[in-house]
Image (spheres, rainbow, N blue to C red):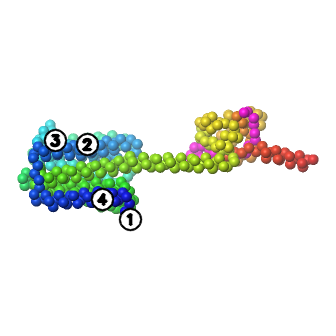
Amino acid sequence: MKLIRNEKKNLLILSGGIIFYLIILILLKENPILFNYTDFLFMHIVLELASIIISASIAIQSWIVFSYKQYQDRLLYFSGFTLIAVFDLFHLLTYNGMPGSMFIDSSANNATWFWILARFTQAIFMVYILHAKVKTVSFAKKRVYFLNTLLTIFVIIGTFSYLQNKLPVLVIEGQGTTTLKNFLEYVISFLLFISMIKLAIIYKKFRKTVTLHFIVAVTFLLLSELIFTLYKSVYDSLNLLGHVYKVLGFLFFMRVLYLSTVKDPFEKLIYIQKKLEMNEKRLTTITASLGEGVFVINQHRQLTFINREGERLLGYQSHELLGKEIHSLIHGSKSGDILHVSECPICKGVESKEAIRIDEDIFIHKSGRTFPVSYVVTPLIENNTIVGSVVVFQDISKQQEYLNRIKLIIIY
């Protein structure tokens, strides 16, 4: 199967990321570079702040987008990435050399537990979001998700604060990660792997660019998790590489959200606008070549469209009639007065779901003169509701003149 441009680009990024990852593992797995404590702490702060900012940005963007499209997955994005951002923030604050928080001390074990909390939230969220059905929910759900997210944060942080000195050890400085830490990382990696399989199935079915970015994001996050089972010191190069791949994964996930909530909808809107403009031009061309006047009114009997022949027959420019209730301007009676609304077939056309054909009636030219017309009123129906009507009319003055001549010939 021939690869399209987006597939080639994402395949190149993914291949480059995997190859670089493998090279670093081969070169540094047994003898990783140990960084100076101060230097590593600075790099760790920068990388963690980057991931926290990205997570918070995704949460905020999802919260805002929900106001325009009430999809449940937007609220899930908000809750999931808010929790990830908070847990990563506590991971940063409790890292060795950091001040800790008000109720939680800084230590390698506490920081690692917050890391695990953030990564479990991330993995479970991705599995759930890929398997959940996309559905709309009421706007009131926004407050429910917000309160539940805050409650979850307070409960988990409170529980962690109470149990911080009783938690199992995940990292032993100088020896590396414990069996429990590796087991938890493998569980997280397995959940991410499930997400990758699901994404591959989705892409094979729909072949959307946004799914490709999602696959790259999850792959980088999976590589990040795997490397965190290998480091021997919290200050070595493998630990640093894991943080770098986590940030890359978050960046691609932010790209996923941008494509699905901003770029793709915007491009679809532009496409629809262009199609509407094209259809409007075609409609104008078609109605101009009919040789008959055409105008459209809404359910309030206000004119929304008139073709050039209609302008010529009535003597008005379109801007003089658009938005106006035109019955009193153009519809006359045989007595010379304005036809009453209750007797007007055009006005009845916005109340009846059936087309109305009138063989002879009277319209009024802008100059005040009257002329005979025939017309057909066709209702415009959307969702079984009348939203207006289309009137196609023609001047029958010549036809009447010919009929009168014929009558005179027959009489004489």
Segment colored magenta: 367-391
First along the sequence among labels 3 and 1: 1
Circle 3 or circle 4, nearest the eye: 4
**Mark 4 or mark 3, which is nearer the start of the sequence?**
4
* Residue 22 lies within the magenta run: no
Q: Nearer the viewer, mark 2 or mark 1?
A: 1
Left or right side of 311 for 401: right
258 to the left or right of 309: left
Residue highlighted by disc 3: 93
Residue indicated by mark 2: 53
The residue type indicated by label 1 comes to Lys
Q: Is residue 318 above or below residue 187?
A: above
Q: Is 377 in the magenta?
A: yes
Quadrant location of the N terminus?
Answer: bottom left
Q: Mark 2 near mark 1, Cβ–Cβ under 8 Å? A: no
Give the SS element for disc 4: helix
Residue type for callout 2: Ile
**Which residue occupies 18% across, 60% down?**
23
User: Residue beneath label 4, please?
Assistant: 12
Seen from the viewer's position, the closer of residues 386 and 338 is 338
The secondary structure type at the circle numbered 1 is loop
Query: Which callout, 2 or 1, points at the residue further toward the start of the chain?
Result: 1
Would you call the spot at circle 1 few (<14 residues within 10 Å), some (14-19), or many (20 or more)?
Answer: few
The answer for how far apart the CA atoms under marks 3 and 1 are is: 49 Å
- Label 4 Cα crowd, 10 Å radius (few <14 / some 14-19 / many 20+): few
Sequence order check: which comes first, mark 4 or mark 1? Answer: 1
**Mark 3 neighbour class, 10 Å CA radius: few under 14, some 14 to 19, many 20 or more:** many
Image check: 371 left or right of 234?
right
Q: Is residue 25 visible?
A: yes
